[in-house]
Image (spheres, grey):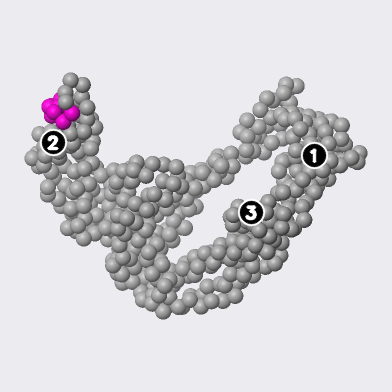
Amino acid sequence: MEYQVEEVSPVKRKVSVQVPVEEVHAAISATVALYRRDVDVKGFRKGKVPSSVIEGKYRKKIIAEATTDLVNLHINEIMGELKVTPLSGIDFDGGELVRDQAFDYVLGFEVMPEFVVPSFEGLEVEEETPEVDDKEVEAVFERMRSQLAELEPIDEEREPQDGEIAVIDFKALKDGEVFENFAAENFELPLGEGQTLVDFENLVKSLKPGAEDTKEVTFPEDFLNPELAGKTFDMQVKLKSIKKKVLPEVNDDLAQKAGGFANVAQMREAVINSYTESRKQLYKSNSQKELLDKLLKQVDFQVPESLVEKNVERMLSETIDRLERQGKGLQALGKSIDDLKEEFKPQAEDLARSEVMLLAVAKQESLNVDDRELDFYFQQLAARTGQDFTQLKKYHIENNLMYAVRDRLLADKAMELMYSKAEIKLIPAKSGDADGDKEETTDSSEETE
């Protein structure tokens, strides 16, 4: 195997590789030998199948695997000799092996820009000290009480009010016909919590038990159910009854039901710990960002475009996933994919600059990621996504994605190292900073169970 390297830019490399016929033949033969050892073919004993039969029967798979194995072998050799580490995936252009023919292909990748890493040892950054207000704990208790509340009928002949539960039968009518996907009986609707359309809730709140009425309701364009979105229906509603929430007392019985706590004191401690740990991680993350920003202000370098594009694609994917979980599409934002990509680009470039700095620190400090750490990463990813560990790792290997995974883990190590060597100045928590983690502690009974 021979190769030539072209420096396309300070961060881009192009490697042209030439593989002689003999090496092509050896790569295919090696893969055939593995198949010959492992596969069963009717009419032959295992391991005794002629190579010609194996290659004829599994040609497509054999050629694909032989090509992948050979290219990956070359990539490791070339990167080792060049002493470079691709910043992202490696682009491959070259097709597949053909027996008795030389094989030429091209690799394209980006590398880390060269610059001097500023000193970070002893660099001073501020970090807020986690604080938990009694009002926040009480608010969690109130949510627990609401979740465990019992419903009690209200016998008064009056319209339902906010904070109460309206028990209704309803259906959507279009041209006098019932819309089958939007109807229910004895549906319990909490009032005043924004769980339904304002016009529909106002219709419910205009009724007394036993009464019914029909009014036009227009559903918004981004309504969760696409069959109703943007359409107008006659909503027929009958109020069956009104119920009120009877909240339990804050006592040891509530603590037991809310999360298996022995008493209220233990439940309070768990809520405080949940808030404290959440804020501790948030404030540490803020402090690390401040530290990284201080270093980035001291250097200038070209940002590899592949890192920017990767960040843009990730941000776009996260936006689409979030909308889909809400039952919406991109049209709900009123923006095209190109609009969003342009909008995300500045933030994506900032993230790329941070990645480059962290990888430069990792290189300077001789940090590395071993196979055990990689396996642990894929085990966690497999557990989180419900995928098979072996297949997940194989996919990353076959698609030249292992460098990107290593980079991510190296960046995390570099950030922790920088943080450990910085001068952390603890300051009181700033007013309003805790708002960002309130959603995380909305149901502390689950988090601390």
Report whether 136 appears left or right of 84: right
Residue 348 x %, y %: 44, 56
Residue 221 x %, y %: 64, 38
Kindly identify the residue that appears in the image at 61 percent across and 66 percent down.
433
Report whether 5 appears left or right of 365: left
Kindly identify the residue that appears in the image at 18 percent across and 48 percent down.
74
Residue 112 x %, y %: 30, 61
Residue hosting label 1: 166
State yes or no: residue 167 in magenta. no
Give the mark, 3 or 2, whose residue is nearer the N terminus.
2
Give the number of marks. Answer: 3
- Point out the frontmost of discs 3 and 1: 3
Residue 343 x %, y %: 49, 52
Give the mark, 3 or 1, whose residue is nearer the N terminus.
1
User: Around disc 2, counting alpha carbons within 10 Å, would you say few (fewer than 14), some (14 to 19), or many (20 or more)?
Assistant: some
Q: Are marks 3 and 2 in contact (CB under 8 Å)?
A: no
Amino acid at dot 3: Gly
**Inter-mark Cα distance, 3 to 1:** 31 Å
Kindly identify the residue that appears in the image at 59 percent across and 61 percent down.
274
Dot 1 falls on a residue whose secondary structure is strand
Amino acid at dot 2: Ser
Dot 2 falls on a residue whose secondary structure is helix
Which labelled disc corresponds to residue 29?
2
- Along the line of sight, the residue nearer the viewer: 441 or 321: 441
- Point out the frontmost of discs 3 and 2: 3
User: Around disc 3, counting alpha carbons within 10 Å, would you say few (fewer than 14), some (14 to 19), or many (20 or more)?
Assistant: some
Which quadrant of the figure has residue 159?
Answer: top right
Residue hosting label 3: 260
Q: Which residues are magenta?
A: 46-55
User: Around disc 1, counting alpha carbons within 10 Å, would you say few (fewer than 14), some (14 to 19), or many (20 or more)?
Assistant: many
